[in-house]
C-alpha cells in the first residue's frame, strides 16, 4: 500500500526518487489534541462580532492564519472588507478565550513517532498557521528534544498562509533548503493537506477530527491514518519503503 502511494506521488509530481530528510508537522490536531478548544473559542469570540461560526467551520478552516479566516468570515457574512489590524484585534479575543480553557493535551502517539523519526536520522520540523506566542512557547517546552527552534514555521513567517504552499516551502528552507521530494508533511485538516500538496511534498493526513476521510483525500493526501498512534505504529513499516 505504501509503495503504491509513493509511486503515485512520484508520477504526479514528476520526481525520480523519494528520499525524506525531514518530517514537517502541523500543530493543532497533530501535536496537540487542541481542536475542540479552538472550536469553542472561535464560536464564542466571533459571536461577539456578529459572526456565526460553527464547530465544523473551525475544523474546515484549521491551519489557515487566524486573521485570514476572520477576514473571510467578515467578507461572507457582514459583506465588508477589514484590514489585517482589525482582524488581529478580533483574533486576539479568540486567543484570549482559547487560553482561558484547560490546556490541550499532547496528541497520543506523537512523542513516540518523533522518537522513531529522530532515530532514523530524519529531522522533525513544525509548520503552523498559529501566531499565538503562548502556544509557540509551549512548542519549545514540549518538543525541544526533537525540534530545533530554527525548524519551526509560524504565521509570522508567511504572508500567504495555508492552503497556499508558502508555509511548507518555508518549512523546507528552514529544514536546510530541502527539495519537496526530500520531506513528508503530517497534517489533519483539508487546508493543511492542500498546502502540503501544493508544495509538492508527500502529505500524510491523520484524521483526528470529525471531517470525513474523503475531504482529506480530496484535498490531496497521499496517505491517511485514523490516529497519530496508528501512524506511529505503522512507521517502521513505512520506513523501509522510503
Image (cartoon, rainbow, N blue to C red):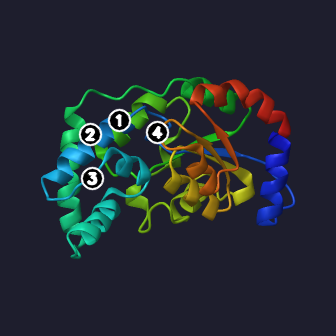
Q: What x and y, as percent, mark residue 55?
A: 33, 44
Q: Nearest to the eye among marks 2 and 4: give it.
A: 4
Q: Disc 1 designates what residue?
A: 36
The picture places residue 226, in percent across and down from the top left corner, at: 60, 33
* Label 1 crowd bin: few (<14), some (14–19), many (20+), radius 10 Å: some
**Residue carrying label 2:** 40
Measure how far apart labels 2 and 4 are at the Cα level. 15 Å
- What is the x, y in percent for residue 17? 85, 55
Q: Which residue is mark 3?
A: 53
Note whether 207 is above or below 46 in the view shown: above
1 or 4: mark nearer the eye: 4
Secondary element at image label 1: helix
- What residue did someone put label 4 on? 210
Q: Pick whichever, 29 or 156, lies toward us.
A: 29
Residue located at (43% from left, 29% from top): 142
Q: Quadrant of the N terminus?
A: top right
Q: How far separated are the C-alphas under marks 2 and 3?
A: 10 Å
Whether residues under marks 2 and 1 lie with C-beta atoms below 8 angstroms apart, the answer is: yes
Amino acid at each position: 500500500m505504501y509503495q503504491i502511494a509513493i509511486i503515485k506521488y512520484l508520477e504526479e509530481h514528476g520526481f525520480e526518487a523519494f528520499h525524506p530528510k525531514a518530517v514537517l508537522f502541523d500543530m493543532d490536531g497533530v501535536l496537540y489534541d487542541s481542536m475542540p478548544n479552538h472550536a469553542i473559542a472561535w464560536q464564542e469570540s466571533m459571536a461577539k462580532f456578529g459572526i456565526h461560526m460553527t464547530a465544523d467551520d473551525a475544523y474546515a478552516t484549521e491551519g489557515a492564519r487566524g486573521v485570514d479566516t476572520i477576514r473571510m468570515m467578515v467578507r461572507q457574512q457582514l459583506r465588508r472588507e477589514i484590514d489585517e489590524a482589525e482582524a488581529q484585534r478580533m483574533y486576539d479575543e479568540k486567543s484570549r478565550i482559547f487560553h482561558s480553557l484547560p490546556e490541550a493535551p499532547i496528541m497520543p502517539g506523537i512523542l513516540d513517532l518523533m522518537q522513531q523519526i529522530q532515530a532514523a536520522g530524519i529531522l522533525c520540523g513544525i509548520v503552523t498557521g498559529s501566531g499565538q506566542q503562548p502556544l509557540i512557547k509551549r512548542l519549545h517546552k514540549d518538543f525541544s528534544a526533537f525540534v530545533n527552534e530554527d525548524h519551526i514555521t509560524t504565521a509570522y513567517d508567511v504572508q500567504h498562509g495555508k492552503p497556499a504552499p508558502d508555509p511548507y516551502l518555508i518549512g523546507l528552507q528552514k529544514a536546510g533548503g530541502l527539495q519537496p521530494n526530500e520531506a513528508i508533511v503530517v497534517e489533519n485538516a483539508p487546508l493543511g493537506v492542500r498546502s502540503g500538496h501544493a508544495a509538492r511534498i508527500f502529505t500524510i493526513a491523520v484524521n483526528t477530527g470529525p471531517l470525513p476521510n474523503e475531504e482529506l483525500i480530496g484535498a490531496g493526501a497521499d496517505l491517511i491514518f485514523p490516529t497519530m498512534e496508528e501512524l506511529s505504529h505503522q512507521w517502521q513499516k513505512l520506513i523501509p519503503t522510503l
